Image: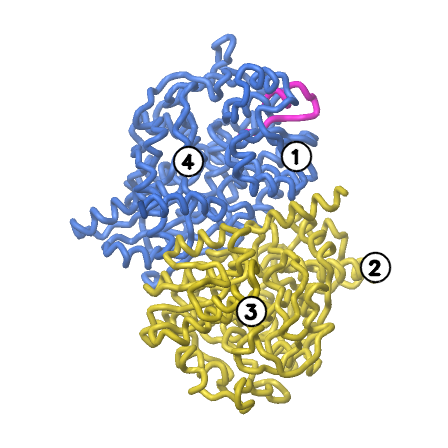
Chain colours: A blue, B yellow
Amino acid sequence: MPEELTRVVLDESQIPTHWYNLLVDFPEPLPPHLHPGTKEPVGPDDLAPLFPVGLIAQEVSDERFIEIPERVREIYKTWRPSPLVRARNLEKVLGTPARIYYKYEGSSPVGSHKPNTAVAQAYYNHLDGVKKVTTETGAGQWGSSLAMACAMFDMTCEVWQVAASYESKPYRRMMIETYGSTIHSSPSELTESGRQMREQFPGTTGSLGMAVSEAVEAAATDPEARYALGSVLNHVMLHQTVIGEEVLKQLAIFGETQADVVFGCAGGGSNLAGLTFPLLRENLDGNTTSRLVAVEPEACPSLTKGTYEYDHGDVAGLTPLMKMYTLGRDFVPDPIHAGGLRYHAMSPMVSHAVHLGLMEALAIGQDEAFEAGVIFARAEGLIPAPESTHAIAGAVREAKRLAETGEEKSILIGLSGNGVLDLPAYADHLAGQGN
Amino acid sequence: MPEELTRVVLDESQIPTHWYNLLVDFPEPLPPHLHPGTKEPVGPDDLAPLFPVGLIAQEVSDERFIEIPERVREIYKTWRPSPLVRARNLEKVLGTPARIYYKYEGSSPVGSHKPNTAVAQAYYNHLDGVKKVTTETGAGQWGSSLAMACAMFDMTCEVWQVAASYESKPYRRMMIETYGSTIHSSPSELTESGRQMREQFPGTTGSLGMAVSEAVEAAATDPEARYALGSVLNHVMLHQTVIGEEVLKQLAIFGETQADVVFGCAGGGSNLAGLTFPLLRENLDGNTTSRLVAVEPEACPSLTKGTYEYDHGDVAGLTPLMKMYTLGRDFVPDPIHAGGLRYHAMSPMVSHAVHLGLMEALAIGQDEAFEAGVIFARAEGLIPAPESTHAIAGAVREAKRLAETGEEKSILIGLSGNGVLDLPAYADHLAGQGN
């Protein structure tokens, strides 16, 4: 009796065998990334000093489905397929006729969706014989995921973490070290750009843009090392599509022909892309009519308030120019708790989908997001990551609307991670309510 | 092809329908709990001020299988069945012919096995119309589990947390408050016993025994409230047997006729009991010959160095006398990181099983445990709770032994929780190694 199901976890044989490449199905082609110097489309040679060949090929692939290497699938199996859960308690609390589902990526070892691409990126670097990967991290979700993946391939990872987070959020740093990788507070004395920034901005607490510059420089100046990015780029979106592919199978087991409305949080865009791109394919193929909603924080509203134009992915302008919704690479968002959503721009692929009207965007304020997170935690037990609470808040709005109209629609939430290491943010929220 | 499986997660329809009650199958009956005053066996009336009728009945039940209430199973479904994973990467790292499996309870909302009994206890209190439950907690795993369960039944929980942990480990406290419950540092000014202890031991940082006294007093003096305990008692062991019941089904899917050697960590005993009691039933029924090993810390070796005698469950001597392996109720273990294993005694049922020779016991030091934890984290991705690293260390010893003898045995590890909120303990361990 499908209507009595609460949680569907697929058999491991049903882990997707292929990633889905939306690039092929866009009604209009994605504008190419441009070389920061020549302003010409970047080619494989431009990217070779930074990325392994496997990932460079995926960045511009014209294959619709790309096979997931056996070794990557083997590692996925230690936590995938991830569960799709019917939020029955939440439905009751909200008094809604809607059927609410959440796809939970927080049961990965580090507690979020990030390992889906970290494992793939470590694998392709490993194939090229790379022994060291550099990256930046803000709050630390991405850095810890890459450190985990590197440990599995007998590689190490060198992480530059924004100084403010390095000091105030030591748990992710300890996680990275437990996996055997190294981590530095950024800006550091270890790179030319780090030293420059320390001189230029004495006492700075760092920024993601500065950390990118350090990690890129470290990889570019070390022939043994490569650089890795946890979001924004096409190949990262690609790797995350295992989320949505699983959802399609799981919804069918629940007896749903589609998710009528889908809410995913969007910072760089990878969680949202992973969840929605396979569903968007079904829309484009005429099989479904799912509304796909990117939820971003009001404090960093690239999709709802930004402009769609070529911009750099980092503050210093070292990365290629990418066509995307951006608030300007100098934009510094308020220090909200959802650190994973504090990015000045949005993945080119997600931006393109919104620009073409294939996807909607919605901005939600921090208070409303945490309020939804607390309702969710008390109803379902899971404490969502601050990023994910934005998707939940979108779903709560819709569920309440449906309670008024009486429509029995299905709502899907992308629960990108758990908030166990973000509990101080919840404490702040609860204290603020008491005022 | 069963030999290629990595992770088996049962369909939710295969969540056990019944808890297994080992009391019925002990070759010799379990010595009864005794009233602390009369030294006569305690009866239901003695326990009624503290526990709901459903749990009192389970404490001395003579039913072999006790049906899990539908509402409890519904909530279990939000995270159960939990995965059984073949630790293929760990096997490679250890170079062992052994097949190593781990049953992972860390994917519950709070990250450990504790919610298995917290949800059941909240349910039976809810049935009796109870609106408030009191309890003590050390590091906070149990307190946060009960707070989560209470939120789901529209109840609240009042938690007394050992002062040292309350100050030094704020995350669990924040978790409890996020679930809408209240938490106090113990000893507090809120109870008679708390005030006495503050007077008697000025500046004390508290102890679990003191916190028990406060929580028991608060329940005993409030007709609206009941008390809940997260381990030790028979009904708690009972609720945890969902772990082992699932394991039996999962091992069969892997093509294993039995787990040859099983390692579980043991503090109060509930995780170990939950994992092993159903396997012990199969041993007693002559179906299997699994070696069942309780792993305890060298710093708190109740099973390996304690005596088997009647003792109180708390320092103040307010609880019934229970026949168990004990280091004496005044025993204060070193402040090791595995807070969940710092209990002066051992569950009467686990003690009885060890006393009858149905189970073995092994003590492992903290360094060896963390070393195994780091090996596991780097191989499998998951960072185990410090408690669980003891079980892993036992398994690593056995796997290395089998590497020498060449025996292809199967090893099962009870991975009772993840160590995400225990990362400072890993940091201490890694720093210590650097010395």
Q: Earlier in the sequence, mark 4 or mark 1?
A: 1
Label 1 secondary element: strand
Label 4 and label 1 in one chain: yes
Q: Nearer the viewer, mark 2 or mark 3?
A: 3
Q: Which residue is mark 4?
A: A273
Query: Given the image, on which type of amino acid does mark 3 rest?
Result: Gly
Label 2: which residue?
Answer: B404
Q: The residue under label 2 is which amino acid type?
A: Glu
In the rendered structure, the residue with mark 4 lies on which chain? Answer: A
Give whichever of discs 2 and 3 has the lower sequence position.
3
Q: In terms of secondary structure, where does tag 4 sit?
A: helix
Q: Are marks 3 and 4 in contact (CB under 8 Å)?
A: no
Range covered by the magenta-colored residues: A216-229
Q: How far apart, in angstroms, are the residues tagged by discs 2 and 3?
A: 45 Å
Chain that bears disc 3: B
State which quadrant residue B225 falls in.
bottom left
Q: Chain of mark 2?
A: B
Residue B370 shown left or right of residue A375 in the figure = right
User: Few, some or many C-alpha atoms within 10 Å of disc 3 (few <14, some 14-19, many ≥20)?
Assistant: many
Q: Chain of mark 1?
A: A
> Residue at horizontal 26%, vertical 54%?
A94
Comparing B236 with A216, the one in front is: B236
Is residue B81 at least partly visible in the picture? Answer: no
3D distance between C-alphas at marks 2 and 4: 49 Å
Task: In this rendered view, identify the residue nearer to me: B429 or B384.
Answer: B429
Q: Residue at x 56, y 37 (%)?
A: A118
Return the residue at label 3. Answer: B209
Q: Quadrant of residue A190?
A: top right
Judged by depth in the image, the label closer to the viewer, 3 or 4, is 3
